[in-house]
Image: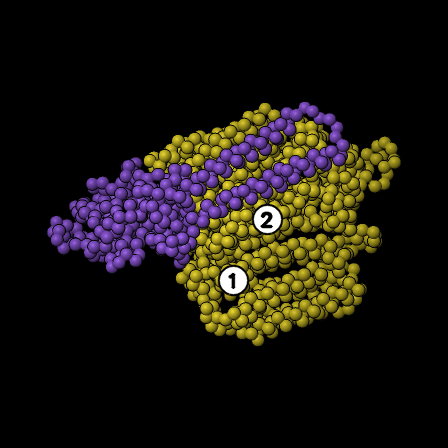
Chain colours: A purple, B yellow
Amino acid sequence: MLGLAGCSGDYSMLDPSGPAARDIAWVWWGMLAFFTLVFVVVVGLWLAAFRRREHRERSEREVRRLSRRWIIGGGLLLPGMTILVLLVFGVPVGQRMLTLPLPGGEEPRVIEVIGHQWWWEVRYPDTGDGEVITANQLVMPAGEPVDFHVSAADVIHAFWIPQLGGKIDMLPGRVNRLRLQADDPGVFGGQCVEFCGTQHAHMKLYVEAMTPADFDTWLSARQAPADMGEDQQHQVAREAFTQHCARCHRVAGVSRGNTGPDLSDVGSRATLGAGVLAMEDGAITRWLVAHQRLKPGNLMPVHDHLDAETLEGLGAWLETLSP
Amino acid sequence: MSDTQVPGHHAQDKTAQLHRELEAVWRNPHGWRALTVVNHSTLGLRFMGTGLAFFLIGGVLAMLIRAQLALPSQAFMTPEIYNQVTTMHGTVMMFLFAIPVLEGLAIYLIPKMLGTRDLLCPRLTAFGYWCYLFGGIILLSSMALEMAPDSGWFMYTPLSSGEYSPGKGSDFWLLGITFVEISALSAGVELTVSILRTRADGMALHRMPLFAWYILVMALMIVVGFPPLIFGSVLLELERATGMPFFIVEQGGDPILWQHLFWLFGHPEVYIIFLPAAGIVSTLLPVFARRPIVGYGWAVAAVIITGFISFGLWVHHMFTVGIPHLAQAFFSAASMLVAVPTAIQVFVWLATLWLGRPRMSLPMLWILGFLVIFVCGGLTGVMLALVPFDWQVHDTHFVVAHMHYVLVGGMFFPLMAGLVYWLPLVSGRMPSERLGRLGFWLTFLGFNLTFLIMHWTGLLGMPRRVYTYDSTMGWDIYNLISSVGGFMLSAGIAVVLLDLALHWRYGRPAPPNPWEADTLEWALAMPPAPYNFASLPTIKSRHPLWHNPALGDEMARGEHALADASHGRREILGGEVLTGRVRERIHLPTNSWWPLFAALVLAVVCIGLLVRLYPLALGAFLVAVVMLLRWAWENGGHPVAAPLGDEEGDELPLHSRTQGGPARYTMGVSLIADGAFFHSLLFGWFYLWSVSPQWRLPEQSPLDPMLLIGAGIAFALGMLWLERRLRRLYAGNETRLALAFYLIAAFGGLHVLLLGVLLWQADLAPTDNAHDAILLVSLSYLLAHGLLATVLMVLQGRRAALGYVSTRLPMEPGVVALFWRYQLGIYAVLAVSLGVLPRVIGGGA
């Protein structure tokens, strides 16, 4: 039904692209190997007990000795040692994702992510003069740790980029912190993993890691004041936007709505509707016409009262919003 | 126990006469009056039958889920419907199938295994059943009305709260589930007390069948584990109905409080489901290994330890919530530790097989299936307890797979083993070996096909509860395999059910004790008589039927205790908790309409709350209270319950002639449940106070200290007087007892009055902020208990005046005194927590 070619990025935690995810993947493979062994041995012993045909009479003392050996060996020592090993190797792995002070004393970059039903608000604080807000895309520098400060605007969501590391819940009224790092520039999948209502399934986050230099360029391009006055071509669409869309959507320099996703750089994004539609020519218009069919139950009202021409105009203008 | 020497048909006549008398006393009525039945066998089967029906509904929902996810981007169900289906699948399977079916099994088996005739509170059994049935019907009716709950089976706030779930779905869930939980609590209380106090003579705790140990621990876990969810449900329903902001951050509440309360219940619940199933394994396995279980003591210790640890694990469902890391490390280690008692049991079973002479049979096949699946699920459980790994796979299909391995492997497979094993007892016929094997293999392979691959789907990043996924995600083939496996699993279950249905007609008649088992239920007729045993045995061994294979015949011939029903009473024996030595005869109430009527009126309360007709709900609630009191009226020393005979032997008194007897235990265990509710309340108060981000303690406590202290003094004086009168009553002095009870009740009334004024003067704004809301709930709780204590005392006065309480019938006031002590305790704790601490630590913060 949906052409999602643009929704690239992998969601597999077994294909890690960052140190935290890599450590956890190793822990998984280690546990899998060891527990497979345990499983085979335990089940094997049970089956062997059935197959055994040597049943001599045993004295009460012998029985007690044998059973104690089984129970202490298998019931106490086996799980006891396993737990010890797991905790010793496993717990430090989680340290990477805690927002502890870095050894060099420098402060990692902070990106704020806020969950909404059913989209992502991404904010870049402390970026000089211009406030940078975007939606459903997360651009981050590669090769350095980034601290994510996450929260939620309505219900509980969860923030997860499987290839980079673990998840953390996004709670209304609280800020949770998580540190992730991407090894190299690349595109990853992120998604909401706490059931958040009707369209929980379509709450994807497009994550792109860039070299720090590219990232700075990306950021400063969005800090520059938008120049809206010159293009007369989209004057009508802008007015329609102000009339019909501005109360919910923000476009830097045009409107300040904050109920729906920020659209200031929507033309430069890879997907629409939090991963429902790949961004290509005409995609925004298609979304405007059919969004309740593409993502049933989403909170944007239908636009049946607007004629096709207006919607097309809006779509065409919004596609130009790309710094 | 007489006349065994008389040879020939005279003895047979006596036996037939005995059975006729017992039959007359214990028989179930037919027609409409079948609704009044309180017999544990009948009700156990009703529980299981109803549970099976709900299981099939839950199974159909599961098939809908697998149909939707079989292919990417399917439009088979809309997201709204899909979310209702997943929510209801989890809810039905957990609350309407798993727990009630196991309760039903316990209700059916426990008295038989303990060598007695019924559970201690037969009317409570019936009441529990009706609450279960009506609660289940109310919950399921939401699907028919297309307003089923859709916030997931653990109903996280704020998604489930008024703002984000404005429909009635959440209300159906909260009210229906609370109703069903009343049933679980009833079963929990009466199973606990029955196991402790009604075992056969000489069945000391260390001679008790392992199954009873498992059920005892399960019952106690229900008693302690369910109240937190009931409390949470009350809060959430109050928030939805009246706007008290318990879970709303801006007004001082906290949505995480719901998660704590839910998982405080939810994690123990997993073990509440697993332990009885493990009990089935521990019962069957030695029978098929043809030797006593190895390491009985180890197994008992493991079960008890599991029960304790399981209350310290709940936070592992919340590792991603962002709680402090030290706490996470603690709960991580605790969660892994629970593997130790579980591993002990696995190796106890292994050692038993190893040292025995195991034979293969259909029940054993299901147990092997259990082992394979459960060990796998246990191992992934240990993985999940590791915090960093949990951060990756939490809320993905990996967890869905793990959970089904643990629950289906840990509960459903042993349940099937038990079903096949105990079927001959119920029907007198053997199930088909061939059809049974086919059913097993289809179920086993179908299950693993569905869920083994699902671990992988989760590792590839598929979140749980998504109604669809896109083909580019790379999850297609795995989901298709899971769906195919799911339908195979269903086919397997269908074959099992077919076998079940056919066996009633075509099954081979079962020989006595068909599996050569050791426990007392196999000494019964198949199917058992409503009174189970014609006479009650004295137990000298942990394996009575291996010790004395003729025991069944001896009991049927009336050669053991209580072989007399000419008095027309339903009688069982009450024993010492530890030794099982007989202490008293217990007279049980007989068939009654009250349980059904009380449950019906409670259903009206539920519906009144659902449709927001609060006057109706309140009126029905009052009627229900009156009914319950009326029900309790014909009890204890009441002549209907315990007519004073002219000549009563002293050697074994009737329980109403003792100073408390089993009723004290029932009250005690009920108060443990109540105390667990109270603990949840305190937890809520201190949690919101210390953790909630926008909590505000007022500068000045709204509670008037003089009134608070006055209420306490009034109640304490009444309590002191009550204790004094009790001592005098036990010493044989009953002068002006009724008057004393009335005056004691007056002190209770003063206590209630002062509390009422305190609440009135506090002028709380409960819909405005969480502080006032939780204060109101706490004080209402105290007030309601005070009121009940007072009413019970008034009734004691009346009963003393009527002669139901006297030096010869001293049982009741001691039981009521327990409730009074409880009230004094909660008053003291609340006075300190709500009155003193905020003043000491200071407000305004």
Position of residue B500 in the picture relative to residue B463 (left or right): right
Q: Amino acid at mark 2?
A: Ile
Determine if residue A177 is in view. no
Position of residue B196 in the picture relative to residue B130 (left or right): right
> Residue B309: which disc?
2
What is the x, y in percent for residue B471? 34, 35
Position of residue A158 in the picture relative to residue A282 (left or right): right
Residue at 77% in and 41% down:
B539
Image quarter (top left, top right, bottom left or bottom right) of the N terminus of chain A:
top left
Circles 1 and 2, Cβ within 8 Å, touching? The answer is no
Mark 1 or mark 2, whichever is nearer to me: 2
Q: Earlier in the sequence, mark 1 or mark 2?
A: 2
Chain identity of mark 2: B
Chain identity of mark 1: B
What is the x, y in percent for residue B619? 53, 60
Q: Nearer the viewer, residue B671 or B291?
A: B291
What is the x, y in percent for residue B278? 61, 39
Residue at 61% in and 55% down:
B673
Determine if residue B705 is in view. yes
Farthest bottom residue in view: B706
Q: Nearer the viewer, residue B443 or B802?
A: B443
Q: Quadrant of residue A68?
A: top right
What is the x, y in percent for residue B780? 54, 64
Q: Amino acid at mark 1?
A: Trp
Q: Nearer the viewer, residue B234 or B607?
A: B234
Farthest front residue in view: A104
Q: Nearer the viewer, residue A134 or B326?
A: B326
